[in-house]
Amino acid sequence: MSSGPVVSVEGLTKRFGSLVAVDDLSFELAPGTITGFLGPNGAGKTTTLRMLLGLAEPTRGSALLFGRRYRELDRAPHRVGAVLEATDFHPGRRGRDHLRTLAYAARVPVGRVDELLRLVELEGAGRRRVKGYSLGMRQRLALAAALLGDPELLVLDEPANGLDPEGVRWLRDFLRAFAAEGKTVFVSSHVLAEVAQTVDRVAIITKGRLVTLSPLGELTSRVAGAVRVRTPTREVLETALGRAGLQSSRLDGDGLHVAGADTHAVGELAAAQGIVLHELVQEAASLEDVFLELTGGNAA
Amino acid sequence: MTAVLRSELLKLRTTRTIGGITIGLLGLVLLLTLLGGLVQKEADLLDRKNQFGLLATGSLAVAFAAIVGVMAVTNEFRHGTIRPTLLAAPKRTQLVVAKVVASALVGLVLGAVSIGLSFTLGRLILHWRGIPFLLDRNDVALVLAGGVGASALWAAFGAGVGAAARNQVGAIVGLLVWLLVAENIIFGLLPSYGRYLPGQAANALTQIDTRHQLAVLPGTLLFLAYVLAVGAAGAFVTERRDVS
């Protein structure tokens, strides 16, 4: 395995006529990391991945894997596995045959095909034609294809699309186990919550530009959270919060929403004033809020 | 190269397309050979050209072979399998060459079974009707090798067209309109130029005694040049165009 960056994207730009799909994008991924590639639909994620995987040519800049363009990589399927669309199958071909055709081209022993069918739990279904597969089964078959060459880097575009909650959990466990072997994962999604429990870093892009590339924890601390508090003496707490420079707004009943605060601050303040609290909760939705704020989306 | 070629041959074997095409082709050849052999008057079948035509009925495999070639490439774009295919085999020219060669091999088999059927059946019918066999050894060699060779070359031609066009319906319709309509109009109006068009050149392999037709060797070489040119165009386009 190489010690340099697994993925290095430098000034990557892609234009389609007057539309700039990817705009001067630069980032690097180190080995052994799981990075979420996030952005709203149409942000340029798929176009970036297509350039990374040698399917599309950049208008400017470069997208390298292990220091090389995908199309110039030696034994590419043994270093990089990727799923771009979970529906890329001939409907009349059996799942196992789909994998066999790719195994031949990638020079992978056919025994690996059955091994992978077991791994993605399609052992029996592999003998059936793909047109009878559910979307979840297709996702798993596509993942098996990506794993044929036992790659060091796995690139997945929206892998959770169409998966049921059980499938999402299976995928999460799988990716964690994959990364635990020191391998690298780059997984895109337009829904932060889908990958929040899997990734340790996020690259967020919007309108083709990188907004941030940071550890997940750092991202949440970027915005001060909010605290929900309930007390029978709301007016007293409001006054106390106001004196402490904290903004609050009233919720239904006897609740208060305190922006930019954490539970420690609000709890200690209440204790100092002898105020009884019935509830003190850190609002956890802040991660999604950050995402929406950074990508310029509206909280729906 | 052999790895990618093996992969392409496996792709062609693992859908029902080729099976369906073979059944359709053999059914049609059976029907047309029976009709040609049993309905034609004895006087007509006492003509060398007509005997050749009867025994070479199976050369209509060329149309099926061309479609197999087109589909070998365009199916990948239609179903999106081009993405996993290019991830597994990123060298695009090599992929196009493998598809052209794999298609040619399938075309060869299609031509062999198709010509085998019409040749055997045609001879049996002539024998049964007591019509003397008028073809010499060269004619027989041309019926067999020409039909099989043309079928292989047409499949390769189709794969090149498919790689250059990508769109399945567009490629098949375009190819058929060109061969069945455009070429015939040009050939009819300007035979001395029209005979150098691909379809007319290829006819040197499957027909005899057609007016203005090129001889077997120059016709075959010219058609082979067309096959290589179309394949090169397909590889050129595949190397350069993005895959969405």
Image (cartoon, coloured by chain):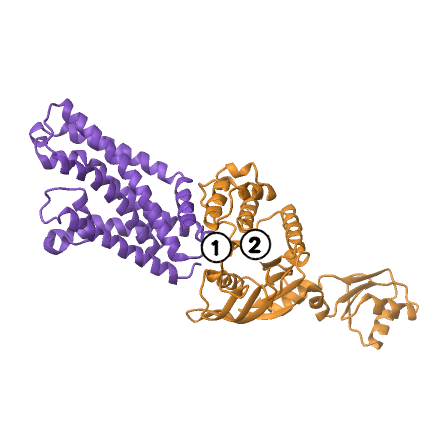
Q: Is residue B224 above or below residue A232?
A: above
User: Which residue has dot 1 on it?
Assistant: B87
Question: Which of pointers 2 and 1 indicates the residue nearer the eye?
Answer: 2
Q: Indicate the quadrant where residue B142 lies.
A: top left
Q: Is residue A90 above or below residue B189?
A: above
Do we see residue A211 in this rendering?
yes
Which residue type carries mark 2? Pro
The reply to whether dot 2 and dot 1 touch (C-beta < 8 Å) is no
Count of numbered tags: 2
**Circle 2 crowding by C-alpha within 10 Å: few under 14, some 14–19, many from 20:** some
Q: Give the chain letter at badge 1.
A: B
Where is residue B181 shown, x and y percent of the image?
20, 50
Q: CA distance from mark 2 to mark 1?
A: 12 Å
Q: Could you tell me which residue is drawn at 37 percent across and 50 percent down?
A: B98
Q: Could you tell me which residue is drawn at 54 percent across and 38 percent down?
A: A125
Q: Could you tell me which residue is drawn at 53 percent across and 66 percent down?
A: A67
Left or right of residue A244, residue B43 in this image: left
Q: Residue furthest right?
A: A274
Q: Indicate the quadrant where residue B104 lies.
A: top left
**Circle 1 crowding by C-alpha within 10 Å: few under 14, some 14–19, many from 20:** many
Chain A color in figure = orange
Do we see residue A297 in this rendering?
no
User: Which residue has dot 2 on it?
Assistant: A151
